[in-house]
Image: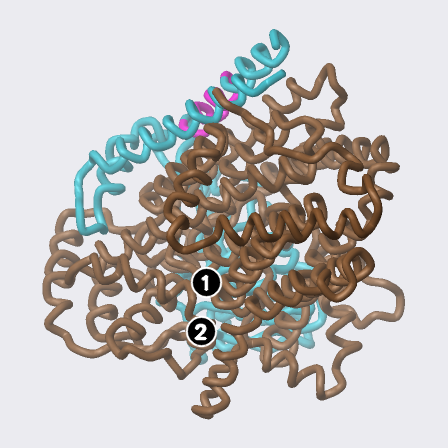
């Protein structure tokens, strides 16, 4: 099996020769890369690129695809979190040919008649959020559902997209393709749309493979094992097995991490800048939550711009500007369109911005801090009796499936905590041992840190508005942390390497078995909940 | 490589053993419904933003009950402590950490040997600073007659003092269900579970369960083979 390491420049190679010589060489590389991008050669280039993908990367992608496909069957129709709203968005987009405008938070939205009929047949509202209510259990119920599905196409019209109406349309536009292929059957349409999400999980796994090899090149095998573990991670895979823009957001964020790593390690070519711009644009169009990631993205571009300016003067600014400009265009158009049409559905970001203007920043900061870290003296308590890092983020990361209603018993969370502590110790050991190498990569690590902080603060600020001010909802769901999946993958690889050369293979195998077991038991738990 | 292979073998045996052990257990069944809990049947009795201690008289505790399901809704749960009294004597109790969400919380309790009627179920919730709904059946008349739940706000200890002088009616009965282990293990239900998995879709049949099993098996084989091949 080919587990070829990506071609790398020897350390320090780029620094040989005078500065003017380096500039000249970089321009030659740029010219060469531009020539490769000519439209006539693009299909050939794509084929050549795909043929260079190592077999191990394909297998990681296949593992994620098959795993997500299994999860897409296990989770009953519409029992994914907000899946009915996401489906309704695509239905509206396909039927009306425009974006939905009315956002609702009630959970009892005015869905289309046909969707309402089918969800009645599925007992959707009885099963949702209620762990002891099973999905359909008799042939008579199936017969009623069949009749509802058959009757549905005759019911004209479309409903509204509930709480996701303010989301950006990228994922929904893509999902409109499998929606169209599903004919008149709502359940077939839903399953095809779920497979689109599964395909995105596969792309994420492949991007993860490259990202882990790029940032931790010392032991390529460990990076492969890390990518396998990510492809088996049940929270990620189950979130990418339903109709949800989270699937595309996670893929885009993994792409952003990879592009950043490449830009810092191999130089920021125009080709990479275009790729990064496209990935940023995909992120912005996938979900409003990408705004949290954008903080780190634009900090990274600023650092790369400073580096470029030092090396190449104004020419060095070209790639960061290209990436930033391409990335911002779709969201700028989306906001402009909403402003011109006086559409209230301008997204949570704008609403959060409104809160910033009202001078509640300190409260939001305090809330955000407490959402992830222990409360400091003097802070207003927002989570009395709860340690969110453990009881919300960790425990729910261990198991939180379906409509937020399928979890493991507490003892499983306790066992998982012990195992996670072991992984954290190994990870810390590796970071300590490699502290000199870390120092040399501080700017790059600062960007990853900013990506993490951006996501956490975005969650904190949005949750403050929803939880403390409106008392309507909360964002205490670990799926919101999935844009940081590359950091999770890196931690796995660090832990494997932290075991030392002798024990690393053993820890690597143990990790794969652990994630495999976690995935299997999570599937069994979900099957027991819905079909028991 | 040898150590890694042994680790893999041990790990796979452990996964198999854990799965088999999980399947030997019985799914919980509802031994008795005090007041039904659930997403559609329940009426919100009140919204709380703090601690609460409440007692509901006139309940019956069946023998062998291992969990009490309480009708309450929260995004972020809170610690819940349940104590069941017969007169002033504590029959059983249990507690649950705040790691729950949804329209009900199940609190594990120590099973008792015999069924006791006329018990009082006391529930303490807190510390809590998050919105929390009490769900149940609104029966103001019943509450007046002394059969509804009474609560003390600001306290979180599940004692009979919750029914003391500072009490106030919650306007009905809180949803309470008594759970015990079912009769058959998961193993004995495999075929019915497989049949249920084949329902609720546009394509139906037990083959869907086999498809899921095949996909999961393929995932396992691919992951293990790749790992073994890349190991140094």
| Residue A78 left/right relative to A218 | left
Residue B55, quarter of the rendered image: bottom right
Residue at screen point 82% across, 50% down: A19
Q: Position of residue A371 (x, y in %)?
A: 71, 62
Question: Magenta stretch: dominant SS?
Answer: helix
The residue that label 2 is drawn on is A163
- The chain containing the residue under callout 2 comes to A
Q: Mark 2 falls on what kind of element?
A: helix
Total label count? 2
| Residue A167 left/right relative to B124 | left
Is B15 in the magenta?
Answer: yes
Residue A159: tell me if it is visible. Answer: yes
Residue with the most extreme top position: B2
Residue at screen point 40% across, 83% down: A102
Magenta-highlighted residues: B13-23
Q: Which chain is cyan?
A: B
Residue A301 vs A343, above or below: the answer is above
| Residue B83 left/right relative to A197 | right
The residue that label 1 is drawn on is B175
Between B30 and B205, the one lying in front of the other is: B205
Q: Position of residue A457 (x, y in %)?
A: 70, 66
Residue at screen point 49% across, 30% down: A54
Q: Position of residue A52 (x, y in %)?
A: 47, 34
Is A34 in the magenta?
Answer: no
Rounded to the nearest angstrom, the CA distance separating label 2 from label 1 is 29 Å
Colour of the chain lettered A: brown
- The chain containing the residue under callout 1 comes to B
Between A527 and A315, the one lying in front of the other is: A315
> Mark 2–mark 1 contact, CB under 8 Å?
no
Residue at screen point 64% across, 65% down: A294
Q: Mark 1 falls on what kind of element?
A: loop
């Amino acid at each position: 099996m080919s587990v070829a390491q990506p071609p790398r420049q020897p350390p320090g190679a780029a620094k040989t020769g005078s500065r003017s010589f380096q500039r000249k060489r970089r321009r030659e590389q740029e010219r060469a890369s531009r020539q490769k991008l000519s439209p006539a050669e693009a299909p050939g280039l794509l084929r050549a690129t795909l043929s260079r993908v190592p077999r191990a990367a394909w297998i990681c992608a296949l593992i994620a695809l098959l795993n997500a496909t299994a999860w897409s069957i296990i989770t009953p129709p519409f029992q994914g979190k907000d899946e009915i709203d996401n489906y309704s968005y695509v239905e509206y987009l396909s039927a009306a040919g425009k974006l939905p405008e009315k956002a609702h938070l009630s959970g009892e939205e005015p869905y289309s008649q046909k969707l309402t009929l089918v969800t009645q047949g599925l007992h959707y509202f009885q099963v949702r959020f209620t762990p002891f209510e099973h999905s359909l259990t008799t042939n008579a119920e199936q017969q009623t559902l069949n009749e509802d599905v058959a009757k549905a196409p005759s019911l004209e019209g479309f409903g509204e997209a509930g709480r996701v109406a303010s989301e950006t349309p990228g994922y929904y536009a893509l999902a409109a393709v499998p929606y169209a292929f599903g004919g008149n059957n709502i359940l077939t349409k839903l399953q095809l749309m779920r497979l689109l999400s599964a395909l995105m999980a596969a792309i994420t796994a492949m991007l993860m493979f490259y990202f882990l090899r790029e940032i931790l090149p010392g032991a390529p095998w460990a990076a492969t094992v890390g990518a396998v573990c990510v492809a088996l991670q049940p929270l990620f895979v189950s979130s990418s097995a339903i109709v949800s823009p989270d699937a595309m957001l996670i893929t885009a964020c993994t792409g952003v991490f990879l592009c950043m790593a490449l830009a810092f390690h191999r130089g920021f070519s125009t080709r990479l800048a275009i790729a990064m711009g496209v990935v940023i644009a995909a992120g912005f169009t996938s979900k409003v939550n990408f705004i949290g990631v954008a903080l780190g993205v634009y900090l990274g571009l600023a650092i790369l711009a400073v580096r470029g300016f030092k090396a190449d003067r104004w020419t060095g600014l070209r790639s960061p500007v290209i990436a930033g400009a391409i990335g911002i265009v779709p969201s700028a158009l989306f906001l402009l369109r909403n402003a011109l049409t006086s559409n209230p559905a301008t997204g949570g970001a704008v609403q959060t911005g409104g809160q910033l203007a009202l001078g509640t920043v300190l409260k939001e900061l305090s809330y955000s801090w407490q959402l992830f870290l222990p409360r400091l003296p003097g802070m207003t308590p927002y989570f009395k009796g709860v340690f969110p890092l453990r009881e919300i983020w960790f425990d729910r990361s261990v198991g939180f499936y379906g409509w937020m209603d399928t979890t493991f018993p507490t003892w499983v969370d306790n066992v998982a905590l012990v195992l996670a502590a072991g992984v954290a110790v190994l990870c810390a050991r590796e970071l300590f041992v490699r502290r000199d190498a870390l120092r040399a990569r501080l700017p790059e690590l600062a960007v990853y840190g900013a990506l993490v902080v951006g996501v956490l603060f975005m969650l904190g600020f949005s949750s403050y508005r929803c939880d403390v001010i409106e008392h309507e909802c909360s964002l205490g769901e670990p799926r919101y942390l999935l844009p940081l999946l590359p950091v999770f993958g890196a931690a796995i690889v660090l832990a494997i390497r932290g075991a030392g050369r002798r024990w690393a293979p053993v820890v690597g195998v143990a990790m794969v078995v652990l994630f495999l077991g976690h995935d299997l038991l999570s599937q069994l738990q979900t099957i027991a909940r819905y079909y028991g | 490589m040898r150590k890694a292979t042994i680790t893999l073998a041990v790990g796979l045996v452990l996964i198999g053993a854990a799965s088999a052990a999980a399947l030997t257990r019985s799914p919980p069944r509802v031994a008795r419904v005090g007041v039904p809990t659930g997403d559609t049947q329940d009426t919100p009795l009140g919204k709380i933003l703090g601690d609460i201690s409440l007692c509901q008289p006139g309940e019956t505790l069946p023998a062998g009950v291992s969990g009490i399901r309480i009708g309450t809704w929260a995004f972020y749960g809170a610690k819940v402590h349940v104590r069941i009294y017969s007169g002033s004597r504590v029959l059983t109790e249990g507690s649950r950490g705040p790691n729950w969400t949804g329209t009900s919380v199940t609190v594990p309790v120590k099973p008792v040997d015999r069924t006791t009627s006329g018990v009082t179920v006391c529930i303490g919730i807190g510390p809590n600073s998050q919105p929390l709904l009490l769900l149940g059946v609104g029966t103001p008349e019943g509450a007046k007659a002394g059969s509804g739940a009474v609560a003390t706000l600001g306290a979180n200890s599940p004692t009979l003092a919750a029914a003391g002088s500072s009490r106030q009616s919650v306007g009905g009965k809180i949803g309470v269900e008594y759970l015990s282990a079912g009769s058959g293990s998961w193993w004995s239900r495999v075929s019915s579970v497989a049949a249920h998995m084949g329902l609720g879709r546009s394509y139906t049949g037990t083959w869907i369960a086999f498809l899921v099993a095949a996909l999961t098996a393929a995932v396992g084989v691919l992951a293990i083979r790749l790992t073994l091949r890349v190991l140094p």
